[in-house]
Image (cartoon, grey):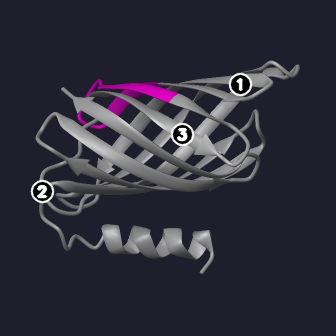
Amino acid sequence: MSLTKLFVATTIALSSGLAMANNVSYDYVQGGLIDYDQVDGVNFKFSKSFTDNFYGKVDYSDLENGGFDISILRLNAGFNMELTNSTDFVAELGYEDFDADFGIDDNGYNIMAGVRSMFTNDLEVGAYVSHSDVLESTDITFEGRYHFDRNMSVALEIGNDDELDEHIGVNFRYSF
């Protein structure tokens, strides 16, 4: 099954409203490890809601592969809309700065759309499609997040990026 078909099937399943749980949070700090086929490193995110439907997010990744380092900074404005009492549609648009030791220093825009859903009271799932103007690539990512309580959670994410290939990550989030 292709990732596109899997994304569509997941989106339909998540938006069907079968699970009834609390809404997802857009106020958090997060840190984690991410591993692409060619590079690996750390990722940090800070998200803060401005209203019930709008939020801002800072996303920073510091990646390396032996001889070179890559840093990616994204400053995004986000929109979320409740599809069911447990599932949100999310969309982000923002600025992206890409800096690599091997001579690439560029900036542009990035865009993302997807769904986040509290599948149970403790398990959040998400599916996202994003595009980077700088990398000229599209990424499909799936995430499963276990909530220990209202504030602390851990997640595993997998995805495929046109430029950096497959990736897997684990992160810890503190929601406030």
Q: Position of residue 173 (x, y in %)?
A: 30, 33
Marks 2 and 3, how far apart at CA: 26 Å
Marks 1 and 2, how far apart at CA: 37 Å
Q: Position of residue 147 (x, y in %)?
A: 19, 46
Q: Nearer the viewer, residue 71 or 59?
A: 71
Which amino acid lies under the numbered mark 2 shown in the image of this protein? Answer: Asn
Q: Give the mark toward the camera: 2 or 3.
A: 3
111 over 146 or under it: above or below: above
Q: Residue at label 3?
A: 34
Q: Residue furthest right?
A: 103
Q: Nearer the viewer, residue 39 or 16?
A: 39
How many circles with numbers are drawn on the protein?
3
Q: Earlier in the sequence, mark 1 or mark 2?
A: 1
Q: Judge the density around disc 3: few (<14), some (14-19), many (≥20) Cα neighbours within 10 Å.
A: many
Q: Residue at label 2?
A: 121
Q: Which image quadrant is residue 9 in?
A: bottom left
Which amino acid lies under the numbered mark 1 shown in the image of this protein? Answer: Ile
Query: Is residue 139 a member of the stretch shown in magenta?
Result: no
Q: Which image quadrant is residue 30 in?
A: top left
Q: In the image, which residues are magenta?
A: 43-58
At x 28%, y 73%, the residue is: 16
59 over 144 or under it: above or below: above
Q: Which image quadrant is residue 57 in?
A: top left
Residue 126 seen by the camera: yes
Q: Which mark is residue 70?
A: 1
Specify the principal SS of the magenta part: strand
Q: Is residue 26 left or right of residue 152?
A: right
Q: Earlier in the sequence, mark 1 or mark 3?
A: 3
CB-based contact (under 8 Å), mark 1 and mark 3: no
Q: Judge the density around disc 2: few (<14), some (14-19), many (≥20) Cα neighbours within 10 Å.
A: some
Q: Position of residue 154 (x, y in %)?
A: 29, 43
At x 30%, y 37%, the residue is: 53
